Image (cartoon, helix red, strand yellow):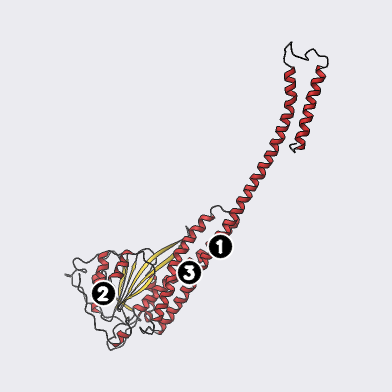
């Protein structure tokens, strides 16, 4: 592993402002149009990485800046360390995506990263937080982006190490894409020359700005859900539940940022933060507060919508049960009528069947009044049954 470079002892100004870089040497400050001195030629016999150094596969982009202007684009961590030693007044900005343990250990040895922060960066799945380890800040951010096709919110995790002359970003997901942040900072060298503090502001600003499309997408989803609820869509309950879970994640990503930025603002005087940068950070804090309040309102709105949906579903079920009960009552009335008429018609059938049997020894078989008697008997039974069923409202 490469040896850690020797750093100058902190003077009074660096003690006051832990992030402020070493003073520039006498002479005019270089600008974006000022030609930079050429880099020393590489020794063809010397490899760009020392034996045993980690591969550069996880490096998204590494650059060395001096007074807000890029002066070198190293291809590996070892090359970055060497070039930063050659530019004591420079700042290294290293972007990594899913780095290996060897890469993180190499960075920890070079920049004195605390083992607890390093452990968090290795394991990922951390809550948003801001911790200070000596002269190094460790920041965990949860980025979010709205996916239009599945109408879902995708969350990413970003770890940021901020030191006196370096910024290290470690991404564990596709979001956030920091290429736009780097490009924006390089296009405004006056802001970039404020040092690592300014880079941290730009990253915070990009993460917070990324929340705006998510808020807009979620608001649109809630509007659609309200329409589906009153339209009686049977799948709306599942959509409400899934969106509520996403809002819980969103709340976990945004709520800690409020206190984090307040803690940063509380240290403005102690660490001598540039006044212009203070304004930028206050603006980011306002946006975070607004976003956090919107997320809270979304959770409450979804809870209310779920209650309304449950009420509507209950009312619909009650209406269906009432309709079924009415249908059952009507069926019972029809069955009563059918049964009544069946009983009435059964009486003459029974009498006719008995007297229709061909037995010579049957009583009344040769009786002259037998036929009228049978007719009167059938009529009497039928009329009696009719009035009985009528009185009981079966007919």
Residue 313 in view, yes or no: yes
Residue corresponding to mark 3: 212
Task: Judge whether 337 appears above or below 120 on screen.
Answer: above
- Please tell me which residue is depicted at 32% across the width and 85% down the height of the picture: 16
* Foreground: disc 3 or disc 2: 2
Task: Decide if residue 313 is on the left or right side of residue 76.
Answer: right
Task: Decide if residue 111 is on the left or right side of residue 236.
Answer: left
The mark that comes first in sequence, 3 or 2, is: 2
Task: Say which element carries label 2.
Answer: loop
Q: Position of residue 303 (x, y in %)?
A: 53, 62
Q: CA distance from mark 3 to mark 1?
A: 23 Å
The mark that comes first in sequence, 1 or 2, is: 2
Q: Quadrant of the C terminus?
A: top right
Number of the label disc, if any, that sits on residue 304: 1
Q: Residues within 10 Å of mark 2 (few under 14, many from 20)?
A: some
Residue corresponding to mark 2: 112
Task: Say which element carries label 3.
Answer: helix
Taking depth in this image into account, of 159 and 35 the one nearest to the observer is: 159
- Please tell me which residue is depicted at 46% across the width and 68% down the height of the picture: 211
Taking depth in this image into account, of 136 and 36 the one nearest to the observer is: 136
Taking depth in this image into account, of 131 and 59 the one nearest to the observer is: 131
Q: Position of residue 166 (x, y in %)?
A: 30, 76
- Please tell me which residue is depicted at 75% across the width and 20% down the height of the picture: 352
- Counting every numbered tag in the picture gives 3
Taking depth in this image into account, of 263 and 36 the one nearest to the observer is: 263
Task: Judge whether 81 appears above or below 376 on screen.
Answer: below
Q: CA distance from mark 3 to mark 2?
A: 36 Å
* Residue at the limit of the structure toward the top, as seen here: 360
């Amino acid at each position: 592993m490469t040896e850690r470079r020797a750093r100058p002892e902190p003077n009074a100004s660096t003690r006051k402002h832990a992030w402020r870089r070493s003073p520039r040497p006498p002479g005019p400050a270089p600008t974006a149009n000022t030609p930079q001195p050429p880099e020393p030629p590489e020794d063809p016999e010397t490899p760009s990485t020392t034996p045993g150094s980690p591969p550069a596969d996880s490096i998204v982009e590494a650059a060395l800046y001096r007074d807000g202007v890029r002066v070198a684009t190293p291809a590996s961590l070892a090359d970055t360390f060497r070039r930063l030693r050659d530019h004591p007044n420079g700042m290294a900005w290293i972007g990594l995506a899913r780095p290996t343990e060897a890469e993180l250990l190499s960075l920890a040895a070079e920049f004195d990263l605390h083992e607890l922060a390093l452990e968090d960066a290795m394991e990922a799945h951390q809550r948003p937080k801001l911790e200070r380890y000596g002269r190094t800040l460790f920041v965990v951010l949860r980025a979010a982006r709205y996916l239009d096709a599945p109408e879902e919110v995708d969350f990413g995790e970003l770890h940021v190490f901020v030191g006196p002359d370096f910024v290290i970003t470690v991404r564990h997901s596709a979001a956030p894409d920091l290429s736009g942040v780097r490009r924006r900072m390089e296009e405004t060298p006056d802001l970039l020359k404020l040092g690592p503090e300014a880079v941290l502001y730009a990253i915070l600003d990009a993460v917070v700005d990324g929340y705006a499309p998510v808020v807009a997408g979620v608001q649109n989803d809630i509007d659609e859900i309200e329409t589906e609820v009153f339209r009686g869509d049977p799948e709306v309950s599942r959509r409400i539940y899934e969106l509520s879970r996403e809002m819980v994640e969103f709340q976990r990503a945004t709520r800690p940022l409020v206190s984090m930025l307040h803690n940063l603002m509380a240290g403005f005087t102690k660490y001598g933060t540039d006044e212009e940068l203070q304004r930028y950070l206050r603006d980011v804090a306002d946006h975070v507060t607004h976003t956090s309040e919107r997320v809270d309102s979304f959770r409450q709105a979804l809870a209310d919508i779920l209650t309304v949906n449950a009420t509507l579903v209950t009312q619909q079920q009650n209406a269906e049960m009432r309709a079924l009960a009415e249908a059952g009552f009507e069926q019972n009335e029809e069955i009563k009528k059918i049964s009544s008429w069946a009983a009435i018609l059964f009486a003459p059938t029974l009498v006719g069947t008995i007297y229709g049997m061909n037995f010579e020894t049957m009583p009344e078989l040769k009786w002259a009044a037998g036929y009228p008697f049978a007719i009167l008997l059938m009529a009497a039974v039928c009329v009696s049954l009719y009035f009985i069923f009528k009185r009981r409202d079966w007919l």
